[in-house]
């Protein structure tokens, strides 16, 4: 169809190879996410979210594309602000979880006692339903904003730690590690020079795929009423608030914020998948 | 064979005991770190004399070293005494048993429904690989896996509760009736939407897993041979593939008890279903420490049972592991 338009600029993607397409998807998705996150700093909640009681509970229209809430605030602005908070919490939680996963993953490679210890800690964290664990940790940190961040951050490392532990075990049986040990290299040197370069791609993909989980759990926990204070525009709080207005038929209060959250989660999944494709090209075309 | 069963039981028992002790201590330390003052919560701002306050502090162990507190709590736990709930003012075990019954009905029903539908969808998708029906099922699973389960609950509430008006919104029992006077039909009507939500969410992982397993089995040599003999369509799937994928799918479904519990917490909150999840949230929000600790312990037992059944399926029911085992010994 586009054969005779080969050099037509807007269609360059149609003929681009998989690598360029993958990169393009990653860049576009990241730009959307970053702009949502940054908009948090540029929108002033005090001026953008004015209460306007002549305009309450409006159904979606061109003026307010997500409708307005019971105080006449524009739901689109509230949703964007909420998503910004969610991405921020997700980022912070992923950083904490990654650090823990890397520390525990490398600890498991030291000796069998340490390995057993790491395995049982993973087992312990896996034996309690995730939501209850986050509730417990956020209570033990005294609740509030930091309670939620720490609760989400301290519980998402288990899948990555499990993968790292298995991967490191596999790498340690290879011959070049044995050789290095014979040559008298220190354990730290082996970790830094031999193991780390081989697991770095898994860490990167693991971190990106951790994001959506962290965001969802943050939303769930604030939906349940833990942590973030009611006047923060977090998605979970918006949805919890919307529950009170459902019976009056204000469906847009719940529908659009949740849909945007789903959109964000799918974007992160998309980025994760495509980064995985870029970093492990050998598994792409199977 | 008998020896193997004995080993299995012994290992699992030791594992269970160690895990429970670890979970109990871990939770206790976490709660102890929090700035909650149990005496203040117990009193709820009512005024008491200094002497009464001191007696209460003694009872709750304020100011004791944490090792003493853990020890006392563990000893009580061994005697089956989980303490008294601060918000319900009855023994924790009584609250948990009552609420857990309601939740088990919810979780069991959605577990069964999601398992059956998920397996069916997975088989349909895997059989018609790369067709439009496969693509629809894949997209459905992908979205459901990424969507927050409480949002799905809200949408279902909007559609069936508000717009269509088929089901009541919120409240475990109708207004004006006592909890003990609820008829079975009223109670079932409250159960439908939570079960529907949990099932819809639970379908996704099992369907995806079944689909991928089936695709793998269908590309194996013995299926190719069966096709060469002239088998095709459903009989082929039924005779060659179904038994191979049924057991892993069942195992996965048992391993999902943890997510099931987490989903139940959120869904119960959305539909105001008076189960263990809603109680856990209430206990957490109102700092009812004994109740929260009790619920976490019960949930850990629940998850352990799921994993145990999955292990039993893997070691004892799967005929392939049986055969391998006899070669090893």
Image: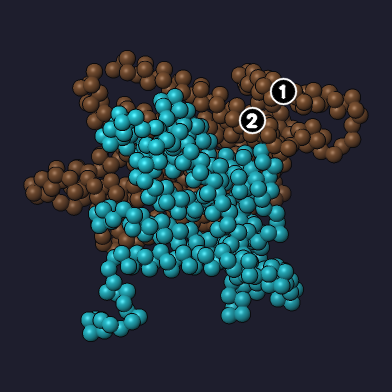
Is residue A106 at least partly visible in the picture?
Answer: yes
Q: Residue at x 41, y 64 (%)?
A: A26
Q: In the picture, which chain is brown?
A: B
Is residue B273 at least partly visible in the picture?
Answer: no
**Is residue A278 rendered to the left or right of residue B290?**
left
Q: Give the quarter of the image for residue B135.
A: bottom left
Q: Residue at x 25, y 26 (%)?
A: B322
Q: Is residue A97 above or below residue A253?
A: above
Q: Position of residue A140 (x, y in %)?
A: 66, 38
**Is residue B144 rendered to the left or right of residue A136?**
left
Q: Residue at x 41, y 60 (%)?
A: A270
- Where residue B29 is drawn, which disc sits there? 2
Q: Please, what secondary structure does the residue beneath circle 1 have?
A: loop
For label 1, the residue is B65
The tag earlier along the polypeptide, 1 or 2, is 2
Q: Residue at x 81, y 26 (%)?
A: B56
Nearest the viewer among B86 and A103 is A103
Q: Position of residue A77 (x, y in %)?
A: 62, 70
Q: Please, what secondary structure does the residue beneath circle 2 have?
A: helix
């Amino acid at each position: 169809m586009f054969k005779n338009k080969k050099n037509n600029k807007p269609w360059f993607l149609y003929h681009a190879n998989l690598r360029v397409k993958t990169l393009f998807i990653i860049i576009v998705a990241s730009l959307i996410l970053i702009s949502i996150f940054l908009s948090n700093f540029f929108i002033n909640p005090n001026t953008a979210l004015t209460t306007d009681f002549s305009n309450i509970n409006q159904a979606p229209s061109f003026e307010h594309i997500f409708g307005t809430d019971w105080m006449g605030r524009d739901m689109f602005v509230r949703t964007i602000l909420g998503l910004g908070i969610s991405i921020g919490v997700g980022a912070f939680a992923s950083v904490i979880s990654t650090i823990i996963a890397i520390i525990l993953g490398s600890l498991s490679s030291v000796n069998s006692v340490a390995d057993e210890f790491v395995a049982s800690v993973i087992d312990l964290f896996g034996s309690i339903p995730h939501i209850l664990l986050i509730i417990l940790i956020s209570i033990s940190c005294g609740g509030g904003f930091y309670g939620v961040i720490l609760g989400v951050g301290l519980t998402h490392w288990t899948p990555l730690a499990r993968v790292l532990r298995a991967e490191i075990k596999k790498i340690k049986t290879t011959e070049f590690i044995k050789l290095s040990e014979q040559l008298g290299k220190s354990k730290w040197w082996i970790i830094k020079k031999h193991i780390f370069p081989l697991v770095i791609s898994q860490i990167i993909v693991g971190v990106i795929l951790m994001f959506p989980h962290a965001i969802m759990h943050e939303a769930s926990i604030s939906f349940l009423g833990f942590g973030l204070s009611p006047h923060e525009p977090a998605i979970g709080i918006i949805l919890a608030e919307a529950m009170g207005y459902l019976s009056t038929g204000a469906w847009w209060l719940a529908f659009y914020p949740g849909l945007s959250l789903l959109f964000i989660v799918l974007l992160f999944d998309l980025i994760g998948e495509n980064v995985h494709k870029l970093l492990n090209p050998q598994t792409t075309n199977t | 064979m008998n020896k193997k069963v004995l080993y299995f039981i012994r290992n699992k028992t030791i594992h269970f005991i160690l895990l429970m002790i670890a979970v109990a201590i871990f939770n206790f330390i976490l709660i102890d770190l929090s700035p909650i003052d149990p005496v203040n919560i117990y009193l709820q701002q009512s005024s008491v004399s200094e002497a009464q306050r001191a007696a209460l502090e003694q009872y709750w162990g304020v100011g004791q070293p944490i090792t003493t507190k853990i020890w006392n709590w563990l000893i009580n736990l061994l005697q089956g005494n989980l303490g008294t709930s601060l918000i319900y003012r009855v023994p924790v075990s009584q609250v948990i048993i009552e609420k857990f019954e309601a939740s088990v009905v919810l979780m069991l029903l959605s577990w069964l429904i999601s398992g059956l539908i998920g397996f069916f969808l997975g088989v349909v998708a895997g059989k018609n690989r790369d067709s439009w029906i496969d693509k629809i099922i894949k997209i459905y699973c992908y979205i459901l896996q990424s969507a927050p389960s409480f949002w799905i609950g809200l949408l279902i509430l909007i559609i069936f509760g508000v717009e269509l008006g088929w089901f009541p919104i919120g409240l475990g029992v109708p207004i004006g009736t006592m909890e003990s006077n609820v008829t079975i039909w009223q109670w079932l009507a409250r159960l439908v939407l939570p079960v529907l939500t949990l099932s819809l969410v639970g379908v996704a992982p099992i369907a995806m897993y079944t689909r991928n397993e089936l695709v793998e089995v269908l590309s194996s040599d013995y299926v190719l041979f069966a096709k060469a003999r002239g088998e095709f369509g459903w009989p082929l799937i039924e005779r060659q593939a179904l038994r191979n994928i049924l057991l892993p799918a069942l195992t996965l479904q048992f391993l999902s008890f943890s997510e099931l519990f987490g989903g139940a917490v959120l869904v119960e909150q959305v539909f105001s279903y008076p189960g263990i999840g809603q109680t856990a949230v209430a206990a957490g929000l109102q700092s009812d420490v004994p109740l929260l600790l009790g619920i976490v312990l019960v949930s850990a037992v629940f998850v352990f049972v799921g994993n145990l059944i999955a292990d039993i399926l893997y070691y004892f029911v799967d005929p392939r592991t049986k055969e391998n085992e006899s070669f090893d010994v």
